Amino acid sequence: MGIPAYQNNDKKILLQDILMALVEAQALTQKDSDQLSKKWAINKEHPLNLILEASLKHHTLVDRNFTSDEILGILATHFGMDYQRVDPLKVPLETVGSLLPLAYLERLLIVPVELNSEEVIFLSSERYVNSWVDEVGAQIKRKIKVRLGSPRQIRHLLNEIFIVQKAFKGLARDQGSSGQEKMRLLRQGKIGELDVLIEKSRGRNQGSQDGFVAKIVDWLINFATLERASDIHLEPKKGLAQVRFRVDGDLKTVYRMDHEAMMMVIARFKILGDMKLDEKRKPQDGGIKRNLENGKQVEMRLSTLPTNFGEKMVIRIFDKNVAGKDLEFIGFDQQDLQLWEKLINEPQGLILVTGPTGSGKTTTLYTSLNRVATPDVNVCTAEDPIEMEVDAFNQVQVNPQIGLSFAECIRSFLRQDPDIIMVGEIRDFETGEMAIQSSLTGHLVFSTLHTNGALATIQRLVDLGLPAFLINSSLSGILAQRLVKKLCSHCKKAVPVDINRWTALLDGEKLTPPSQIFEPVGCEECKHSGFSGRLCVYELVKIDDRIKKVIHGNVEISELREKTRGFYRSIRFNGARKVASGETSLDEVLKIVY
Ligand SMILES: [Zn+2]
């Protein structure tokens, strides 16, 4: 490119410039500024990094430090620049990487983060280094806008963009000239022929290609965990294949790649997950354990599905540390927490955790089991699939193909002197009967059902043909749960309660409406979604004598509902409480009640 990095008028920003700006904005006292200036007099780190990592005390709010966003916002205003936090998921990695050479961007410490046909937005940490703007603008024939960014973030993004860029370029180079032929086959939907062609060219270039593919796979895993994604979807489509992450329950497209690259990425995952590489017509499962760059360990469950555009893969990511979490994540009321603790510490009984897929049942089960799995008890679990490996449990993967059903697992457990048994799911009479029998013979049994609520769970057990007297003598408690989005605490706004909707939510239960509730808005902190993270709403029902009296051999849900009114607090009540406390919105809870 031949453009010198710094020209005559360019001047690198100094610690003094930044300290002065903060003092002028009254974010820092002159005294503190003098101290910091002395402390960092000979530090070689970029001054902006020093400030951002110093945890400066907030000037007006007690007990709170400035966030990086706040500091950068203050400085940007002072320097007459824009500031906006960059969401790495929204940076178009595919396109920004081809604008300018990495070495050039690194030297100037700038990174392109947004672009369209007219303009490109760059992050820069250097307010007084501007000579590149005109030159780069001319070179890439677009208007240049510069926003303030931290040096650390800029380096991180550059890394992200160019590792991926290089890997895909390398892949494309090695694919040779058969690309057009492959696109033609793809467009015509001739997936079988396409596979053959790709296998052939794979044989020729395997060595170097595998290196690039491995880099892309590593990047995907690290990127997904960094963004707290719970699932990675690898989806072949008619045009470009896409990668989507599920974050806080919503899917977001993060990358598009050509069909062939996607097939190789999926193939690499299949190899890591010990799955059959050449089986593409039938769905398959597999698993991977990985150590991340930050030293954390993650476990992933892989599954494939043959679609009309080729094999699709979903990778579920499990946080290894989840089993070590405490029960706090369920968000129990004090009273319910005590009740749950009591139930899971009984020597026997049947405890059911229910809800649809993705309602956090597994987390509840693992967390609860982990609390009672002391070295002096034998915990046996039958799972399908084993979602997380936990040292304290004896875990068995059920396998119906060889006759190892849930029921058969329990039968085998009983010969192994168990104290606590966890059965992945009660789907049939036999499993239900085995679970009940074991709980009646001095074991604590945990299981799940795919039902909507506590009463529906009782009805399901009756419908499976389990006799009412057995249910009554074994079942000790049911926890029915759902996940709702948590409001972002930085931007949620107070609104008055619409009494009609409040009453509709409670559906007959009594809870005084709060003076105000909250609705989502959207800000930099929550990536403009208005929400951040998720929380449980639940109903916890202790099966006491009053409820047992209502359960009989052909009980219907309407009768259960009628006669158990007031015996326990419904999920609606719990949801309303969490709306009243400002944790979530009324709409979020209304979405999940039934
Ligand atoms: Zn927000």
Image (cartoon, rainbow, N blue to C red):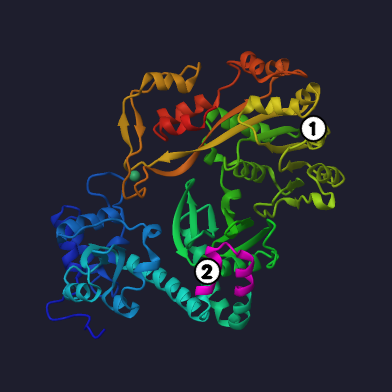
- At which x and y percent is residue 313? 59, 58
Q: Say which residue appears at 63% left-offset and 69% top-offset.
A: 193
Secondary structure predominantly adopted by residues drawn in magenta: helix
Q: Is residue 195 magenta?
A: yes
Q: Observer-nearest residue: 380 or 56?
A: 380
Horizontal relation, residue 85 to residue 214: left or right: left
Q: Read off the magenta span.
A: 180-198
Disc number for residue 184: 2
Horizontal relation, residue 89 to residue 311: left or right: left
Q: Quadrant of the C terminus?
A: top right
| Tag in front: 2 or 1 | 2
- At which x and y percent is residue 192? 64, 66
Q: Observer-nearest residue: 473 or 260?
A: 260
Q: Say which residue appears at 54% left-offset and 60% top-offset.
A: 236
- At which x and y percent is residue 541? 63, 26
* Residue type at numbered disc 2: Arg
Give the answer, above or below, for where 330 lies relative to 316. above
Task: State the separation of the CA atoms marked 2 and 1.
Answer: 58 Å
Question: Tag 2: Cα neighbours inside 10 Å, few (<14), some, or many (≥20)?
Answer: few
Residue 338: image quadrant is: top right
Mark 1 lies on residue: 436
Which quadrant of the figure shows ligand 1? Answer: top left
Give the answer, above or below, for where 357 lies relative to 401. above
Give the answer, above or below, for where 73 lies relative to 125. above
Ligand 1 is within 8 Å of the C-beta of the residue at disc 1: no
- At which x and y percent is residue 234? 54, 59
Q: Assess whether mark 1 and mark 2 are in contact (beta carbons under 8 angstroms).
A: no
